[in-house]
Structure formats: structure tokens, C-alpha cells
Image: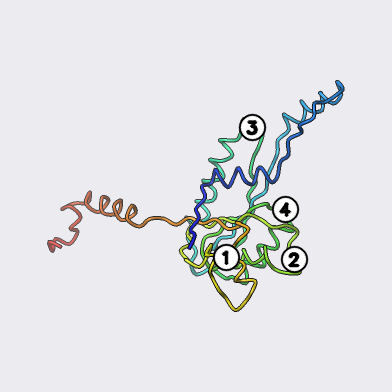
Amino acid sequence: MKFRSLSSVSLLLSLVAAACSVATDAPESEEAIGETQEASHRLTTINLGALVDIGGPSTSPHFQQAVELAAEQMNAALKHKNLRFAWFYGDTKSSPALTRTEGIRLINDEDVLGLVLDSSGDTIAAGRLNHEMPAVTERKVAITCFQCSSAFINNPAATDPDPVTQATLRDLENYIWRVFFRADFEAAVMVRVAMQQPNNGDGNGDGL
């Protein structure tokens, strides 16, 4: 099985490459030169979508906050490049069906070029949009998931009775990129916080 992970910067670069083109021919007139200089100072905005559980059973304020923090950091880093990301949200409520509906809306109505998701099931639902025939979206988009633990995603040998789901899981065209936190680091921080409490974390004094 192939497991892929992609940093925000790498996803950013791939989306920029897809959204922006660079002219290679030198301008031949002063007017063309002026237009080129004006264009170099023009702000380019790339739309991205976040499909996360905002009002559903698995909601956490940290999901949207994580997206907002990443957007703030990326826009700050690219400020001198006259490039910015605009974010559009879709509330999945942890429902694959709603994820599909909101994904179609973000791609077709908000013109997003990439999607960020928060779970394996919703990511598969969004990934199907890149494989459905006839196509229901105006374009295929890059997808990254920040807590996808399913070993079926990105598995070139994955099988499923539904051919669209199977193509999504195998993802041979590399649309889906996923990351997943390592619990050992999180556990170490939690232990350290607990040990800083009175009595080395023994709040009830039972010695355990």
C-alpha cells in the first residue's frame, strides 16, 4: 500500500502551478511592457474550499480554526508575491451525502481549485467527484485530508463493488493527499501537562 502525505506548502505550490501561467515571450512594445509591469503588481487570488464538520455530530471548533490558521500563515508568506488564498466553507455535518453536495457547490459556484477535508469518509465522498461520469463538476481538484486514517485511501490494490469508489480509493491520478497525526507526540504533551499539576498530576491523592 502506498501512503502519501503532503504539506500545506507543497499543496500550495501544486495549486499555484495549476492556476497561474508565466509568459515566456518577451514583450515587443512599450505598451506591452507597461501591461506586464501592471500585471506584476496585480493581486492574484486562488479560491480553496474547506469541507469540514461545523454543525454536525463530530464537530470541533479546532477543525475550522486549523483551516483559518493555515490560511493566515500562507497568505502572510505570499504577501510579497501578490498572491493570496480565499477560503470558502462547506458544512459537511460528517455526512458523505452532504459532503458531495457541498463539494459540487464549492467547485462549480465558488470556483475552488482545491479542497481540504477532515475525515476519511468525507474525503472519499469528495474524491468521487473527480471520477463520476458524466462529470458533475466543472473541473477536477486536488484534495488534502488532515486526519484521514483509512488504509484504503491511496491503496492501488483497493477494491470496491462500486467502480467510482474503487477508482477514488486507488487514486491513480494522485488527486488525494492525506496526513494523520502521530498519537505518541500528543500523548507526551498530555503527560507533561498532567505532571505539571499539583502532586505530579495526582488530583485526588490516591497515589495512582
Q: Hey, what amino acid is under mark 1?
A: Arg
Residue at mark 2 to residue at mark 3: CA–CA distance: 34 Å
Q: Which residue is mark 2?
A: 135
Q: Earlier in the sequence, mark 4 or mark 2?
A: 4
Q: Which residue is mark 1?
A: 170
Q: Earlier in the sequence, mark 3 or mark 1?
A: 3
Q: How many marks?
A: 4
Q: Earlier in the sequence, mark 3 or mark 4?
A: 3
Residue at 54% over, 48% down: 68
- Who is closer to the viewer here, 2 or 36? 2
Q: Secondary structure under badge 2?
A: loop
Q: Which mark's residue is nearer the viewer, 1 or 4?
A: 1
Q: Is residue 186 left or right of residue 59?
A: left
Q: Which residue is mark 4?
A: 111
Q: Earlier in the sequence, mark 2 or mark 3?
A: 3
- Who is closer to the viewer here, 118 or 90? 118
Q: Are marks 3 and 1 in contact (CB under 8 Å)?
A: no
Q: Are marks 3 and 4 in contact (CB under 8 Å)?
A: no
Q: Secondary structure under badge 4?
A: loop
Q: Secondary structure under badge 3?
A: helix
Q: Hey, what amino acid is under mark 2?
A: Ala
Tell me, for residue 81, which label it has, or none.
3
Q: Hey, what amino acid is under mark 4?
A: Asp
Q: How is the image coloured?
A: rainbow
Residue at mark 3 to residue at mark 1: CA–CA distance: 36 Å
